[in-house]
Image (spheres, helix red, strand yellow):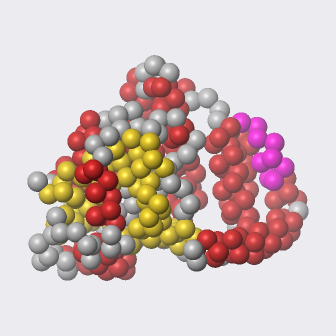
Amino acid sequence: MTTVSVVSVFYNRSTLVDDTVKSLLDQDMTDYEVLLVDDGSKDDTLAQLNRYADDPRVRVIGGENMGFVNAINAAIDEAKGRYIAVHGSGDIAFRERLSRQSAVLDARPEVGVVGCRSEIVTLQSTRAPHITPFTFDGDAETEILTTNPFHHGEVMFRRDLFYKVGKYRSYFVCAQDRDLWCRLSHHTQFVVLNDVLYRKFAKVPGSVSADPRRLLLQRYLSDFAVFCHRERLAGRPDPLDKYGTQGGLFKPPSRELSKSLCTIGSRFAADGDLDNAKLFYLRSEQESGYLYARMMRIVAANAPFLLTGAGKLYRRIMRVFQKASFSK
């Protein structure tokens, strides 16, 4: 059996194929395969992927558009590896990524999911590149209630555990990873390596982070995944399993979701996007009556110059701290 199967799903990202695939083929380990999936792209992504089909490590999978969750589930069904390494289309894997993560899974049977620190490059934004500071090693059942330890694209996990918990659930479109980590945390320990092994590009056109409406959906679904997790921890049935898609109606207002939406609103404000700042402040206030969000929404509506001025100062301060972090 192959040790690692890398699975990367592309949709309309033909210009990002080369850098991603080259980074995957330049890994310092030998026992791995790369599954390159085209999810029914309307551009020439499939043609670009097929340029690498002659490499014996590569399998190109094409077909009609199924959506990311269904496409990655289908690709993992065809994988031969004991371990599955997800890889975000357009992102870059540093040369030791696969070997370092698989070594942890080889040496520590109690660990089932391994991530790493990442360089985050935010496109179409004034935010400077930075390195994620979060590391972790241990039981994540309660940690994941308040923190998502991974970005998704940098993660490697045991294939048998993936099937044990029922794969990605299609209901959680845009938040399928948070739901998967929650369910996996019942059965295994997590590790986030201190090593910087991955470069992630945020706000890539077509991505969740670049689409405010999909980002909003992601936050709501992520919060519902956490609610389902809380219910399981309390010994109650998973609402999605018990009630199907209507399970979301049972989720109570969430203060954590309000804070998250308000934070995103402030990021939009800092980038000068007041329309989306107002949207996220409004949704934050509606979720749980978050007073700070209400105040920020009033400021955005009546004195937007205060937000844009504060945003300029915020960006200057963040550049200093992020550049310092990035240079370490």
Magenta-drawn stretch contains 195? no
User: Which corner quadrant holds the N terminus?
Assistant: bottom left
Q: Which residue is painted at 66% across and 56% down in the image?
A: 264
Q: Residue most toward the front? A: 107
Q: Height in image: 202 above or below 224?
A: below
Q: Which residue is painted at 55% across and 45% down in the image?
A: 147
Q: Is residue 202 left or right of residue 307?
A: left
Q: Is residue 125 left or right of residue 139?
A: right
Q: Is residue 162 left or right of residue 128?
A: left
x, y percent for residue 116: 43, 59
x, y percent for residue 279: 69, 54
Taking depth in this image into account, of 301 and 143 the one nearest to the observer is 143
Taking depth in this image into account, of 315 and 38 the one nearest to the observer is 315
User: Which corner quadrant holds the C terminus?
Assistant: bottom right
Location of residue 126 by image quarter = bottom right
x, y percent for residue 20: 34, 74
Q: Main secondary structure of the magenta part?
A: helix
Q: Height in image: 228 above or below 47?
A: above
Give the residues drawn in magenta, as a range. Answer: 288-297
Magenta-drawn stretch contains 295? yes
Q: Is residue 23 visible?
A: yes
Q: Which residue is painted at 54% across and 56% down in the image?
A: 134
